[in-house]
Each structure stands twice: as C-alpha cells, then as structure tokens.
Image (cartoon, grey):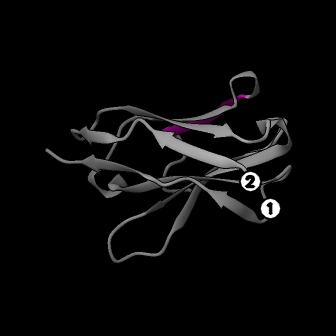
C-alpha cells in the first residue's frame, strides 16, 4: 500500500510562507496524481491543488490561486506545496493524497496531515 507522509506545517504570521512536502513510500510516485487537501475546523475537506503523474496537468482552487504552487520531483518520490502570502483563513490541517495518473481519479491513499496555523 502506498504510504504518504506530509511535513512542513507550523505556525506562521499572515503574509508569511511555508513549503509542505509529501513523501511517498511503497510505490514509485511517477504513476500517481497527487492532490493537496485541507480541512479547517467545522468545515468540509477542500481540494486545493492537484498535479497529474506527469506534471502536465495542474489545478488550483480559487481560494489559493496565485499564492500556492504545486510541484513534484518523482526521482525523490516527493510532491511539494509552496504556500506564499498566507492568510488566517488558510489555517487548516493539510493532507496529500494519491490517485491513479489523473487529477479526476479517486484518491485512495492519504497522508496523516500536517497542521498549518496562520496567526498574528
């Protein structure tokens, strides 16, 4: 079973930046699309970005477009989420998840989540 581990979360002030990492083990990452999701207290889980297995397709939610950047390094079995200009409303637990090849596939493997808190 594919295992995903997120890291890089923490406490940051508004306007600051963080880079989240999602490292895969068990299988090589190059056949998987990877999505980033977040869930804030009292809210539904939200898909914020996705990158296809080849990197040829990238999506962003409107709430993060222009501020967040997703990328992948298949040789390192890692997907990154660079988060800039962070806002308090970005506070959430962030998860990465794997699906087969395309970003419209099911996401069957999930990481444990990493907490991002944006506060002054």
Up the image or down, 48 lies above or below 46; here it is: above
Question: Mark 2 packing: few (<14 Cα in 10 Å), some, or many (20+)?
Answer: few
> Start and end of the magenta stretch?
67-73
Disc 1 versus disc 2: nearer the observer: 2
SS state under label 2: loop
Q: Which residue lies at the image location 40% right of the left edge and 57% below the top edge?
A: 93
**Residue 72 included in the magenta stretch of the image:** yes
- Residue 60 at x, y percent in the picture: 62, 50
Q: Identify the residue at the far left of this view.
A: 120
Q: Which residue lies at the image location 81% right of the left edge and 62% below the top edge?
A: 105
| Cα distance in 3D space between marks 1 and 2 | 20 Å
Q: Which residue is mark 1?
A: 104
- Residue 92 at x, y percent in the picture: 36, 58
Q: Are marks 1 and 2 in contact (CB under 8 Å)?
A: no
Which quadrant is the C terminus positioned in? top left
Q: Which residue is mark 2?
A: 1
- Residue 107 at x, y percent in the picture: 72, 62
Instruction: In this rendered view, identify the residue nearer to me: 83 or 80.
Output: 80
């Amino acid at each position: 079973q594919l295992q995903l581990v997120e890291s890089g979360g923490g406490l940051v002030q508004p306007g600051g930046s963080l880079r989240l990492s999602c490292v895969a083990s068990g299988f090589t990452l190059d056949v998987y699309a990877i999505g980033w999701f977040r869930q804030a207290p009292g809210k539904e889980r939200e898909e914020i970005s996705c990158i296809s297995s080849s990197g040829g397709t990238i999506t962003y939610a409107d709430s993060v477009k222009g501020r967040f950047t997703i990328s992948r390094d298949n040789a390192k079995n890692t997907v990154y989420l660079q988060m800039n200009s962070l806002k308090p409303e970005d506070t959430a637990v962030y998860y990465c998840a794997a699906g087969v090849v395309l970003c419209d596939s099911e996401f069957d493997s999930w990481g444990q989540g990493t907490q991002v808190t944006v506060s002054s």
